[in-house]
Amino acid sequence: MSDMFPDAVSRYAAGQGRLGGSLRLRGVRRRALQWLALPAADLFAAQLGILLAFTGLSALADPLAPPLQWEAPLGAALGVALLAAHRLLGLYDTTGHGALERLRLRVIGAVAAPCLAVTILVAFDLAANVTLSSIILASALAGAIGLLLEGLLRPVMIRHGAWGSPALVLGSGAAAAGLAERLMRQPELGLRPIGFAADCVAAEAPMPLPNLGTVAEAARSHGGAVAVIAMTGEMASGEIARLPFHRIIAVPDSGNLPTLRVNFRSLGGDLGLEVSNLSQAVAQRRIKRGLELLITIPVFLVAIPVVLVLALMIKAISPGPAIYVQRRVGLHGRPVDVLKLRTMHIGAENLLAELLARDPAARAEWDTHMKLAHDPRVLPVIGDFLRRSSLDELPQLWNVLRGDLSLIGPRPFPDYHVARFDQDFQQLRMSVKPGLTGLWQVAERSNADLRRQEALDTFYIRNWSLWLDLYIVLRTLPAVLRAQGAR
C-alpha cells in the first residue's frame, strides 16, 4: 500500500497520528473551532472593514479633520448581513468546497451584504448617520479581510480536524484508490478520508486507506461520514439513493470534461451536463484583455526603474546584454519573442550540453522537469535571486501590453519543451494565449514535472473563467514571496 501512494500516505498518516489524541481529548474545542471560527472571523472582518472605511472616507473628505467614529448600528447590521449572506451561500459548510468556489462565494457575499445591511438599518430606523458609500466600502473591505482570515484559519482548522467532514470512499479498484489519494493530497477540499468500503473488493488494487468492510458495516460504524463514490459502473446509479448515508458525493469519471462551470439539467428523467467553454468565448476574451490592461499598465510604469536597476547589476557581474529575447511558442503555434532579464552566463547552452553529457543525474532531472535545481549556467548571486523572486520576468509586462502574452495563462515554452508533450496537449495548449503567470506556477512553481505541468495546464484551459484568473492573481504574490520551488 505505502509503495503505491508513498507521499500521500506518509503525510496523511502523520497528520492523523497528530490528530488522534487531540480529537479525543479536545472534542468540544474542535467542534467550537469548526462551528465558530469562520463566523467569528467574519464578524471581526466586518468591524475592521467599517473602521478602515470610515478612516479612509474621513481622510478623503478632510485630511485635517478627526476620523469618523465607528458606528455601532452599522457594525451590527453589516456583521449580521455578512453572517446571513455567507450562511445562505453555504460558506460555513467546509465540506467539498474548493478554494476557487469559496472565493467566488465570498465575492458574491460581499456584494449582497450591503443590500442586507441597508435593509436592516432601514427596518430598525438606524440609517440616519450612515451613507451608502460607507456601507459599500466597508463591505468590500470586510470581504477582503474575511478572505485573508479564512486563508490563515484554514490550515489551523485542517490540523485540528475542524475543516470539513470525515469521508468514506465507497468502491474498490484503481478509480477508488486514485480518488482516495486525491482527497488525502487536498485536505482543503474538506473531505477527510477515514477508510473505504465495498461489497466486492478488487483484490488486484490495493487501497491507501483501511478496509472498513461492506457498505452496510461501514454505515453502522461511521454513519455520520460523507460517502464519496468513484463512479465507474461498479455501482449502479439507482443504488446511490438507497445508500444509508445522509450526504453522498458521486464522483464520475469526467475524462476530458471540465470540472468547473458544469450545470445539471433534468432531461425527461435523464441527467444532462451542460458545459460552457469560456476560453473560446469572444466576449470573455475581450473582458479579460481589458482587465489585464488595467492591471498591467500601472504595474509596467512602476517596474521600469526596477528593471533599469536590475539591468545595471547584471552588467556589473557579467558582460553582455542585460535583457535577452527568447523565442517561445504562442497562440496557434505562432512564435513569440519573450523578453527576460538575463540570469545566465553568455554561452549558457554550451554549458548545459556539457553538463548533461557528463552527469547522468542532471540528465534525468532535466528530462523530468526541463529545469535544474543547481544550474551551472546561472549567474552568481544576482541570477539565483532574480529567478527565485521571478523578477527576471518583469520585462514580459511589455509582451502583455503588446498582446503577445496574457497576464494569466499557460506559460510560453520553447520548442524543445513543447515537443516533450503529446500532440493532443500541444494543440490544446496552443488554443489559448500563453501568460505571464499560470496555475502550475502558483501551485507548484518549478517543482512540477512534465506530467503535472500537463495536468494543471489542461485543468486551466478546460475550466478557464475570470474567477479562475482572479484566484491565480491572488495566489501569485504569496507564491513569489515564498520563492519556494522557483528555479
Image (cartoon, grey):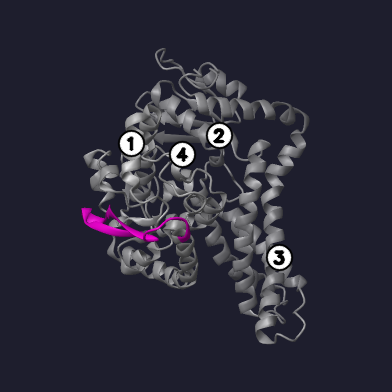
- Vertical comparison of 383 with 107: above or below: above
Q: Kindly identify the amino acid type of the residue bearing the numbered disc 1.
A: Glu
Q: Kindly identify the amino acid type of the residue bearing the numbered disc 2.
A: His
Q: Could you tell me residue 433's position as x and y percent?
A: 30, 57
Residue reaching furthest top?
203
Q: Could you tell me residue 161's position as x and y percent?
A: 66, 35
Q: Which residue shows up at 27% across the image and 38% down it?
A: 420
**SS for callout 4:** loop
- Dot placed on the residue nearer the N-terminal end, 2 or 1: 2
Disc number lying in front (4 or 2): 4
| Residue that carries the numbered disc 1 in the rendered image | 354
Q: Is residue 396 left or right of residue 46?
A: left
User: Which region of the structure is painted magenta?
Assistant: 316-339
Cα–Cα gap, marks 4 and 2? 48 Å
Q: Kindly identify the amino acid type of the residue bearing the numbered disc 4.
A: Ala
Q: Which residue shows up at 43% across the image and 21% down it?
A: 172
Work out whether residue 346 can be spotted: yes
Q: Kindly identify the amino acid type of the residue bearing the numbered disc 3.
A: Leu
Disc number lying in front (2 or 1): 1
Q: Is residue 244 left or right of residue 343?
A: right
The image quadrant of residue 12 is top right
Disc number lying in front (1 or 3): 1
| Residue that carries the numbered disc 3 in the rendered image | 48
- Dot placed on the residue nearer the N-terminal end, 1 or 3: 3
Cα–Cα gap, marks 1 and 3? 59 Å
Q: Do the residues bearing badges 2 and 1 touch, measured as CB atoms within 8 Å?
A: no
Relative to the observer, which residue lies in front, 251 or 486?
486
Q: Which residue shows up at 66% across the image and 25% down it?
A: 17
Q: Does the stretch in magenta take in 102?
A: no
Cα–Cα gap, marks 4 and 1? 16 Å
Q: Which label was assigned to residue 373?
A: 4
